[in-house]
C-alpha cells in the first residue's frame, strides 16, 4: 500500500505460493479495499487467453494504479516484457525458498558431505533464482526505470546480499512513508531502484501477527550502464 500511495503506475507483487497470495490479498482488501486501485490476481488454472488478457491490462496509458498479484517461478515471473511505463515496479515477498522435499534433502546432504553448504544448493540458490527472475521484469530496456522491493528481513543477511547482482551493491534503507521521496530522488534519471525488507513499521499482518516490514530501497547504476546479463 505504501508503494501505491507513493507513485501511480503498474506494479506486480510476487509471492512464494498461491496460498500466501490469497491470504495477503484477502488481508489487503480488508485493510484498504480497491481505494482507486485496480487489482488483478493470478490463478493456477489460468489458460493462455486469460494470461494474455492479464498482461494486456498493463498499459502505459493507464492513469491510475494497477496491482497484479502473482507467484514467483510461474508464468508472469519469467519471459514477459512489459516495457516502459507498462511496469514501474515489482514487489517480491519472501526469499522464494522451495518447500522441503525428499529430493532436496538428498541434494543438501550430498553437498554437506562434500564440506559445502548443502542448504545453499538445495534451497537458497533456487530461491534467489526466482527472486531475480521476478525482479527482472522491471528493467527490460536501457530507457526503463522502476523500483524493486524485496520484503523479507533475510535479504539483509550476508548470505543473501552476497548473491545480489553487481548492480544491486548500493542500497538505501527507507520506511514506507519515505518511498515518495525515494521516487523523486531519481525522477530525472533513467535508473533502476531496488528495495529489500527488514522488520519495521509497515505491515499487512494486523491482528494475524504477521511480521512487520521496513522497506529498504536501493538505487543502482543507470539503466544505460546495465549489461544484457544484468537485465534479468
Image (cartoon, rainbow, N blue to C red):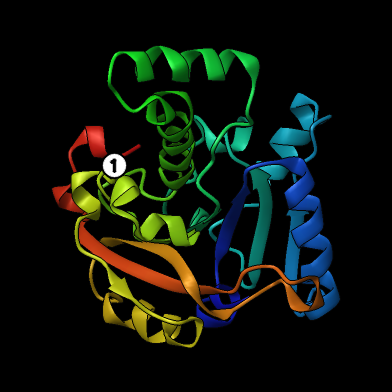
Residue placed furthest toward the left: 225
The answer to whether any part of residue 88 appears in the image is no
Residue 11 image-quadrant placement = bottom right
Please identify the quadrant where the N terminus is shown.
Answer: bottom right
> At which x and y percent is residue 21?
74, 51
Residue 227 is left or right of residue 85, and the answer is left
Q: Position of residue 147 (x, y in %)?
A: 41, 63
34 to the left or right of 54:
right
Q: In which quarter of the image is residue 169?
A: bottom left
For the point 80% across and 57% down, which residue is it?
A: 23
Where in the figure is residue 192, as x and y percent of width and height? 30, 59
The residue at 46%/44% (across/down) is 137
What residue sits right under mark 1 in the picture? 163
Q: Is residue 90 visible?
A: yes
Q: Nearer the viewer, residue 89 or 9?
A: 89
Residue at 17 percent across and 51 percent down: it is 224
Position of the C terminus by quadrant: top left
Q: In this view, does 204 lie to the left or right of 167?
A: right
Amino acid at each position: 500500500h505504501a508503494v501505491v500511495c507513493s507513485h501511480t503506475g503498474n506494479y506486480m507483487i510476487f509471492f512464494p505460493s498461491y496460498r500466501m497470495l490469497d491470504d495477503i490479498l484477502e488481508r489487503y482488501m480488508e485493510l484498504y479495499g480497491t481505494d482507486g486501485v485496480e487489482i488483478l490476481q493470478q490463478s493456477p488454472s489460468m489458460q493462455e487467453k486469460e494470461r494474455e488478457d492479464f498482461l494486456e491490462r498493463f498499459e502505459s496509458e493507464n492513469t491510475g494504479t494497477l496491482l497484479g498479484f502473482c507467484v514467483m517461478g510461474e508464468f508472469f515471473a519469467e519471459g514477459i516484457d512489459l516495457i516502459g511505463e507498462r511496469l514501474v515496479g515489482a514487489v517480491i515477498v519472501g526469499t522464494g525458498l522451495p518447500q522441503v522435499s525428499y529430493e532436496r534433502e538428498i541434494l543438501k546432504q550430498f553437498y554437506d558431505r562434500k564440506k559445502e553448504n548443502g542448504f545453499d544448493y538445495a534451497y537458497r540458490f533456487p530461491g534467489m533464482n526466482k527472486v531475480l527472475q521476478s525482479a527482472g521484469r522491471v528493467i527490460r530496456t536501457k530507457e526503463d526505470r522502476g523500483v524493486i522491493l524485496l520484503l523479507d528481513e533475510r535479504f539483509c543477511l550476508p548470505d543473501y546480499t552476497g548473491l545480489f547482482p553487481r548492480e544491486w551493491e548500493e542500497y538505501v534503507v527507507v520506511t514506507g512513508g519515505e518511498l515518495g521521496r525515494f521516487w523523486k530522488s531519481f525522477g530525472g534519471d533513467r535508473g533502476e531502484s531496488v528495495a529489500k525488507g527488514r522488520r519495521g513499521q509497515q505491515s499487512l499482518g494486523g491482528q494475524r501477527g504477521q511480521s512487520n516490514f521496513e522497506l529498504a530501497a536501493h538505487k543502482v547504476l543507470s539503466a544505460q550502464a546495465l549489461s544484457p546479463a544484468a537485465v534479468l
